[in-house]
Amino acid sequence: MGAPGAGKGTQAVGIATHYGVPAISTGDMFRDNVKNGTPLGKQVDAIMKAGDFVPDELTEQIVADRLDQPDAQGGFLLDGFPRTMHQVDALDDYLDKHGHSLDAVISLDVDPEDLIARLLKRAELEGRADDNEETIRHRMEVYTSSTAPLLDAYKSRGLLVAVDGNGTVDEVGARIAAAVDAKVGR
Ligand code: ADP
């Protein structure tokens, strides 16, 4: 978990490799659908461009379908999900039903002024439709109001691993691996 620009996507790939599990990114799955012009893509395109959340039920369904795949049976890393309390509950239900549970919830903390700079740089490099200043601001607000409270919920369950997300990709990656290894007793 982390604000837009915190480095979730970048670090998700590294940490998933570290643990030999797939990185499952809701943002990437939605973007693939938009790119390929699928019915789901057509449904979420405008929502994503505006920086709003895709409806919970839709998001929960694509995550459940993805977690059902064979490569996720030995574990998985979720990137960008859950983002609302409703999604937290849906994930709990899914995991309960399948006899699984979360090992850790990683939060990446980055200085706010760096976040905007990172996102504007990514806009130049990748041209993502939602990386313009107005939408970035909106996504930040949505994160603060809707997603940040989830950190408290996971903290009170003893699952939260808060990591300093400032620094190079390798520095932050090493910090995450060390913190999560310690948490899961590896
Ligand atoms: P960022 O964290 O930089 O905003 P993501 O790739 O995680 O980027 O998400 C991009 C967009 O995809 C979000 O602004 C939202 O529209 C949609 N999205 C991704 N994950 C979710 C989710 N769990 N619930 C609702 N919408 C989501």
Image: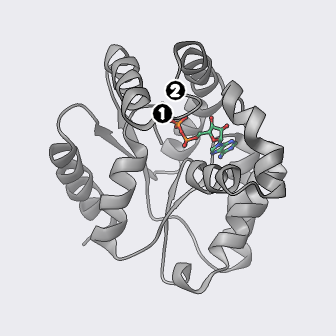
Does residue 4 lie above or below 84 as drawn? above
Pinpoint residue 128: horizontal percent, then vertical percent: 52, 35
Pinpoint residue 36: horizontal percent, then vertical percent: 69, 57
Which residue, given by chain and number where applicable, does mark 1 sit on? 127
Quadrant where the C terminus is found in the figure: bottom left
Name the amino acid, label 1.
Gly
Which residue, given by chain and number where applicable, does mark 2 sit on? 131
Mark 2, ligand 1, within 8 Å: the answer is yes
Q: Does the residue at mark 2 contact the one at mark 1 (Cβ under 8 Å)?
A: yes
Q: Residue at x 67, y 79 (%)?
A: 68
> Element under label 2?
loop
Residue 156 is left or right of residue 34, and the answer is left
In-front residue for pair 56/99: 56
Residue 147 is left or right of residue 50, and the answer is left
Q: Residue at x 27, y 69 (%)?
A: 18
Pinpoint residue 22: horizontal percent, then vertical percent: 46, 71
Q: Which mark is residue 6?
A: none
In-front residue for pair 185/71: 71
Task: Answer yes or no: is residue 54 visible.
Answer: no
Q: Residue at x 40, y 21 (%)?
A: 120
In-front residue for pair 155/6: 6
Residue 55 is left or right of residue 166, and the answer is right
Q: Quadrant of ligand 1?
A: top right
